[in-house]
Image (cartoon, helix red, strand yellow):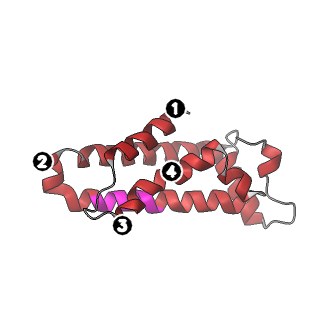
């Protein structure tokens, strides 16, 4: 990831933007650690939903609920990504960093389903995103 100085919000940024930066990027603060733990919990829950949806019998009975949960997590991760871009001083630098790309890739599988005829994205693409995430 780029150096922290490249990502800090500008001095003239609002207090809210500075606070968001501290919570999201500073892991040495109590709020930052709490954010990380919460985010990891959401990531694990999202992976569980995707795994459950891959089981035909579970999908047949709970498909609507699982798709709703998947859209919820996609919305949540999209808000997290946009907030990360908003609170840094150089959004393009973050977006092009490995972690920025992983954040973007985490929402693409579900959003790509809108353009799929069957309403399902490629499982191999989802597997790729998961493997890239856990590689870091």
Determine which of the numbered discs, if any, sits on residue 135 in the image: 1
Q: How many labels does the image show?
A: 4
Residue sitting at 38 percent across and 48 percent down?
A: 46
x%, y% of residue 49? 31, 48
Disc 1 packing (10 Å; few <14; some 14–19; many ≥20): few
The residues tagged by marks 3 and 4 sit, at their Cα atoms, a distance apart of 15 Å
Which image quarter: residue 27? top right
Q: In which quarter of the image is the N terminus?
A: top right
**Frontmost residue, 24 versus 91:** 91
Q: Do the residues labelled 2 and 1 touch (CB within 8 Å)?
A: no
Contact between labelled residues 1 and 4, with CB atoms less than 8 Å apart: no
Query: What mark, if any, has residue 57 been given in the picture?
Result: 2
Q: In this view, does 112 lie above or below 5?
A: below
> Is 26 positioned to the left or the right of 5 in the image?
left
Dividing the picture into quadrants, the one containing residue 63 is: bottom left
Q: Where is residue 108 in the image (x, y as percent from the top left)?
A: 46, 56
Q: What element carries label 1?
A: helix
Residue drawn at 71 percent across, 57 percent down? 92
Q: Distance between the residues labelled 2 and 1?
A: 30 Å
* Residue found at x 45% / y 36%: 131
**In the image as oriented, which residue stretches furthest toward the right?**
11
Residue that label 4 marks = 105
């Amino acid at each position: 990831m780029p150096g922290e100085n490249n990502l800090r919000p500008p001095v003239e940024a609002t207090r809210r933007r500075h606070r968001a930066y501290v919570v999201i990027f500073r892991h040495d603060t109590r709020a930052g650690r709490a954010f990380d733990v919460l985010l990891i919990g959401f990531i694990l829950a999202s992976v569980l939903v995707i795994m459950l949806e891959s089981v035909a019998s579970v999908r047949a009975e709970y498909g609507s609920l699982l798709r709703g949960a998947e859209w919820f997590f996609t919305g949540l991760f999209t808000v997290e990504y946009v907030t990360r871009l908003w609170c840094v001083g150089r959004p393009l630098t973050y977006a092009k960093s490995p972690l920025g790309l992983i954040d973007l890739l985490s929402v693409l599988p579900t959003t790509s389903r809108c353009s799929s005829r069957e309403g399902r994205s490629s499982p191999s693409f989802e597997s790729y995103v998961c493997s890239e995430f856990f590689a870091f």
